[in-house]
Amino acid sequence: WKIKTDPSHCESVVKIIETNPNELINTPLKGHATSIGTSNNNPVDQMNWHQLKLAVSECIDCPLHQTRKNTVFGVGDEKADWLFVGEGPGAREDEIGEPFVGQAGKLLGQMLAAIQLKRNDGVYIANIVKCRPPNNRNPASTEVNACEPYLRRQIKLIAPKLIIALGKVAAENLLGRSDSLGSLRGKVHYYSDIPLVVTYHPAYLLRALPEKAQAWKDLCFAKALMQSLAK
């Protein structure tokens, strides 16, 4: 995370959030189920952690089960205040069954450390889909829909104070909108009643190094928002 991380920037963002909260709030589009309630009496909505993990490990609800080596459920503090949601597992994640363990995972760890967070301490990390799409392509809508009940239940069980959407695929599916990532950054969105902030996916930052400075601003924004929520 080799950029100039200026702590004073985070403090200035706190003041912006406190003085202009309405300008930073973005209402989700109507018609999208950004809810963490139940859906059509789906049995997943009643599962505990053990049942949910077992169901994911045995899932054959979409074609991705045919090519996966392992399902990638999620990892971290199951009562976390911070929930980071990425797109889907990559090759390394598929091999060992844990999200963000490759180079992108190393960068995510550095990003967390920059705002005084640790991977398993008050932080949970998950993905939109729990099986690797072949060739690391974006997950298809049918694949996302098959996984959505599992992610929804995870969010319900965790009850985070703040969700960070890592990249366009995560933001698009959590918010139900296809706006550009740039237009979604720097605002407070909501998944149900949980505040949500959008930033770049670490894998993208590895390819676009200059954008790390923008991601740092997003992290400061998220940290400032979390501080304001605690007041």
Image (cartoon, grey):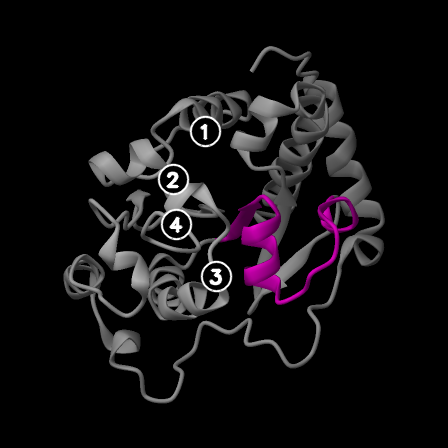
Numbered label tally = 4
Residues shaded magenta: 161-185
Query: Callout 3: 10 Å neighbours few (<14), some, many (20+)?
Result: few
* Location of mark 3 (residue): 140
| Circles 2, 1 touching at the beta carbon (< 8 Å) | yes
Q: Secondary structure at mark 1?
A: loop
Instruction: Tell me the kind of residue under disc 3.
Output: Ala
Looking at the image, which residue is at 56% across and 23% down?
206
- The N terminus: image quadrant: top right
* Location of mark 2 (residue): 122
103 vs 97: above or below: above
Q: Earlier in the sequence, mark 1 or mark 4?
A: 1
13 vs 189: above or below: above
Question: Disc 3 or disc 1, which is closer to the eye?
Answer: 3
Instruction: Tell me the kind of residue under disc 4.
Output: Pro
The reply to whether residue 121 is visible in this rendering is: no
CA separation in Å, label 2 and label 4: 29 Å
Looking at the image, which residue is at 56% across and 48% down?
165
Front one among 135 and 124: 135
| Circles 4, 3 touching at the beta carbon (< 8 Å) | yes
Q: Secondary structure at mark 2?
A: loop
Q: Secondary structure at mark 4?
A: loop
CA separation in Å, label 2 and label 1: 8 Å
Looking at the image, which residue is at 72% across and 29% down?
214
Q: Secondary structure at mark 3?
A: loop
* Location of mark 1 (residue): 117
* Location of mark 4 (residue): 133
Residue 170 spot, x, y in % from top left: 54, 52
| Circles 3, 2 touching at the beta carbon (< 8 Å) | no
Residue 146 spot, x, y in % from top left: 37, 69
Q: Earlier in the sequence, mark 4 or mark 3?
A: 4
